[in-house]
């Protein structure tokens, strides 16, 4: 690694999103930055590392062997950083961080579930928690919850999954899904 420039968190976040989504354009949608900014971050990161992380072209997207190894380290660093931020907030006596909530397209129109009212109430109670709301299919929601990319999924699900808490939200079939290891503020008993 070149010693004149150090890695930064944003580069790791960009790389992790690109690798997970296997696409610059999908990473652009998730991160909310331009494809050229993603390309620049990836080029800078590869330049600093001195090796290629991924291959893009007609054959599709793939991580190089070194890219796969680096991804595992990047995921660990980002996870530790998130935990450090969470623990720091708890030491201050406040909950903070980002809560990623996924809904189905149809949930927004359900009158029995007033999502804006619920989110406003949550924001009032936990003002330091940033809420990221995304729309995904049920399969994408389940995968996102299982892989810790989605904290809470709201939708209709047919079966129970190991390590997932499923709570009915209203008489129809909408359920909230979250990891059994989710933060206390998300647990059904949290007030």
Image (spheres, grey):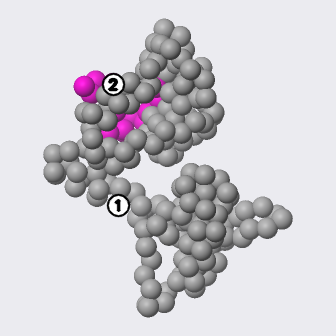
Query: Which residue is identified by label 1?
Result: 81
Q: Can residue 14 be found in the magenta stretch? A: no
Report the residue at 56% width, 60% height from top. Answer: 33
Label disc, if present, on residue 25 of the rendered structure: none
Q: Nearer the viewer, residue 36 or 137?
A: 36
Furthest residue to the top? 171
Position of residue 103 in the picture relative to residue 167 (left or right): right
Q: Is residue 148 above or below residue 102?
A: below
Q: Quadrant of residue 129?
A: top left
Disc 2 element: loop
Q: Can residue 179 be found in the magenta stretch? A: yes
Where is residue 167 shown, x and y percent of the image?
A: 43, 21
Residues rendered magenta in the picture: 176-191
Question: Looking at the rendering, in which quadrant would you find the C terminus?
Answer: top left
Q: Nearer the viewer, residue 4 or 189?
A: 4
Report the residue at 35% width, 55% height from top. Answer: 82
Evaluate whether residue 144 shows in this view: yes
Report the residue at 55% width, 55% height from top. Answer: 32
Position of residue 129 in the picture relative to residue 52 (left or right): left
Query: Which residue is identified by label 2?
Result: 188
Where is residue 179 shown, x and y percent of the image?
A: 43, 36
Furthest residue to the right? 58
Distance from label 1 to label 2 (Cα)?
26 Å
Where is residue 34 shown, x and y percent of the image?
A: 61, 62
Name the N-terminal-most of marks 1 and 2: 1
Disc 1 element: helix
Q: Is residue 8 above or below residue 175?
A: below
Evaluate whether residue 145 shows in this view: no
Position of residue 5 in the picture relative to residue 35 (left or right): left
Report the residue at 43% width, 90% height from top. Answer: 3
Q: In which quarter of the image is residue 9?
A: bottom left
């Amino acid at each position: 690694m070149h010693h004149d420039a150090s890695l930064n968190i944003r580069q790791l976040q960009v790389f992790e999103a690109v690798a997970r989504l296997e696409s610059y354009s999908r990473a652009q949608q998730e991160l909310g930055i331009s494809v050229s900014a993603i390309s620049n971050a990836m080029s800078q990161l590869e330049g600093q590392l001195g090796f290629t992380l991924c291959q893009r072209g007609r054959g599709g997207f793939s991580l190089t062997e070194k890219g796969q190894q680096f991804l595992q380290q990047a995921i660990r660093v980002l996870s530790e950083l998130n935990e450090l931020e969470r623990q720091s907030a708890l030491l201050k006596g406040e909950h903070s961080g980002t809560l990623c909530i996924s809904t189905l397209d149809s949930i927004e129109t359900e009158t029995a579930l007033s999502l804006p009212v619920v989110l406003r109430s949550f924001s009032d109670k936990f003002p330091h928690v940033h809420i990221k709301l995304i729309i995904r299919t049920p399969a994408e929601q389940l995968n996102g919850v299982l892989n810790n990319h989605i904290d809470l999924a709201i939708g209709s699900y047919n079966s129970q999954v190991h390590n997932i808490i499923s709570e009915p939200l209203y008489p129809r079939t909408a359920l909230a899904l979250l990891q059994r290891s989710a933060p206390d503020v998300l647990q059904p008993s949290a007030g």
